[in-house]
Image (cartoon, grey):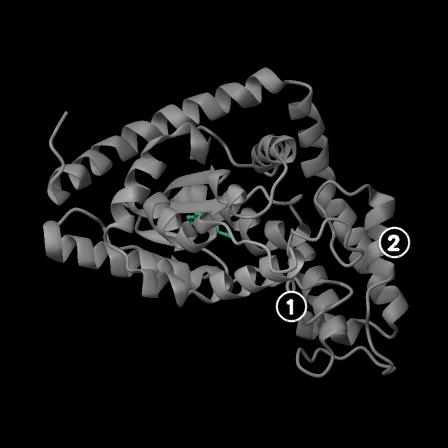
């Protein structure tokens, strides 16, 4: 069976973009058709300026929401990265395979480092931000992963994981499966409601253009009703020229099936399109929020799931990491 691994970073509250772009497919497809692991990658959250209590809170919340969204511990493995030492163990070994030039070429590093420097006014960038893609490669390679479902912004990192796997195998003998990135064909690419040309990310915490999975229905309605559109009169689906309207149509389509092109013909005005989109999102989120509430009332259950998940993950990763240690020349303990 195909081994699938993906991770979600607890640096912000999860959004509609995370749900429609990734999580829903993990729930509907990946956990059913493959041998899948889903990881709250908390070590990755430490690569930029962070508040320890917040990371802890967001990690617990992300795990709870993944379960609320329908990841089923009987079908897949849900766990927290820092609970499994193998990630850090393998990451060091992969640092001895990667080069510093390779790291500095990573687009996300360049962008984030520039942002961090700006933010701290000439301040520092954590070394872990530079080595982040190596840790990500370790996440993937430790499990013999075949497929990594990720968004466009992560494909370069998965390419790096491939390169490192191939290089390691050539130098030290066949050890790792060479993974590939898969881009979910049907997943919606949800854009920021206020800036429809940029992705609905989770880092900006109070963004009026970002719908969070735990937003109250009225907050969702307000955000959708205030979405930026344009001054044209008819509802036309055109991603390039009319990104705001296209985004609403795509969200509506993703919520209820159908496709954005057809839906554009159904609407006469932006007002009704927004209203229906808002209601569709509210209904989409309702069961997730209800389940989230139930799970929050039973923290012992969630902790148990994560403990079992970590144990299962450890059992899978340990033999792989042990063999990488042997292959690269470390003396067996
Ligand atoms: N870097 C990914 C992101 O920012 C998160 C991540 C970490 C990940 N390790 C991973 C994704 C391994 C897939 C596989 O979204």
The C terminus sits in image quarter: top left
- Secondary structure found at label 1: loop
Please state which of residues 2 and 81 is positioned toward the viewer in this rendering.
Answer: 81
- Write the residue at 30% across / 36% down: 89
In the rendering, at what x and y percent does residue 134 appear? 35, 51
- Write the residue at 67% across / 64% down: 191
Answer left or right for 42 relative to 197.
left
288 shown above or below 206: above
Quadrant of the image occupied by residue 243: bottom right
Quadrant of the image occupied by residue 233: bottom right
Q: Is mark 1 within 8 Å of ligand 1?
A: no
231 shown above or below 115: below
Q: Which residue is mark 1?
A: 259
Hey, which residue is sitting farthest front in the picture?
122
- Write the residue at 57% across / 34% down: 59
Please state which of residues 216 and 322 is positioned toward the viewer in this rendering.
Answer: 322
The N terminus sits in image quarter: top left
Tag shown at residue 85: none
Report the label total: 2
């Amino acid at each position: 069976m195909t081994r699938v691994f993906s991770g979600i970073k607890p640096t912000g509250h999860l959004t509609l973009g995370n749900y429609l772009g990734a999580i829903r497919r993990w729930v509907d497809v990946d956990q059913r058709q493959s041998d899948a692991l889903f990881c709250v990658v908390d070590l990755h959250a430490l690569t930029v300026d962070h508040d320890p209590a917040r990371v802890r809170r967001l990690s617990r919340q992300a795990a709870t929401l993944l379960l609320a969204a329908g990841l089923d511990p009987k079908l897949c493995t849900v766990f927290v990265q820092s609970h499994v030492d193998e990630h850090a163990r393998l990451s060091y070994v992969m640092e001895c395979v990667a080069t510093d030039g390779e790291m500095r070429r990573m687009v996300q590093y360049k962008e984030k480092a520039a942002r961090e420097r700006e933010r701290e006014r000439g301040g520092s960038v954590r070394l872990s931000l530079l080595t982040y893609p190596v840790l990500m490669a370790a996440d993937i390679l430790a499990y013999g992963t075949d497929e990594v479902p990720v968004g466009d912004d992560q494909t370069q990192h998965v390419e790096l994981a491939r390169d490192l796997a191939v290089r390691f195998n050539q130098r030290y003998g066949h050890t790792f499966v060479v993974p590939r990135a898969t881009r979910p064909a049907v997943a919606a690419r949800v854009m920021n409601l206020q800036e429809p040309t940029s992705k609905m990310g989770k880092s900006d915490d109070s963004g009026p253009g970002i719908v969070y999975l735990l937003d109250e229905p009225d907050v969702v309605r307000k955000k959708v009703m205030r979405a930026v559109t344009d001054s044209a009169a008819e509802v036309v689906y055109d991603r390039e020229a009319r990104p705001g309207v296209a985004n609403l149509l795509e969200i509506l389509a993703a919520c209820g099936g159908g496709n954005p092109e057809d839906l554009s013909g159904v609407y006469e005005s932006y007002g009704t399109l927004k209203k229906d989109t808002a209601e569709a999102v509210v209904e989409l989120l309702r069961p997730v929020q209800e389940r989230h509430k139930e799970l929050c009332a039973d923290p012992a259950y969630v902790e148990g799931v994560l403990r079992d998940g970590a144990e299962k993950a450890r059992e899978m990763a340990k033999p792989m990491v042990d063999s990488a240690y042997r292959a690269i020349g470390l003396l067996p303990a």
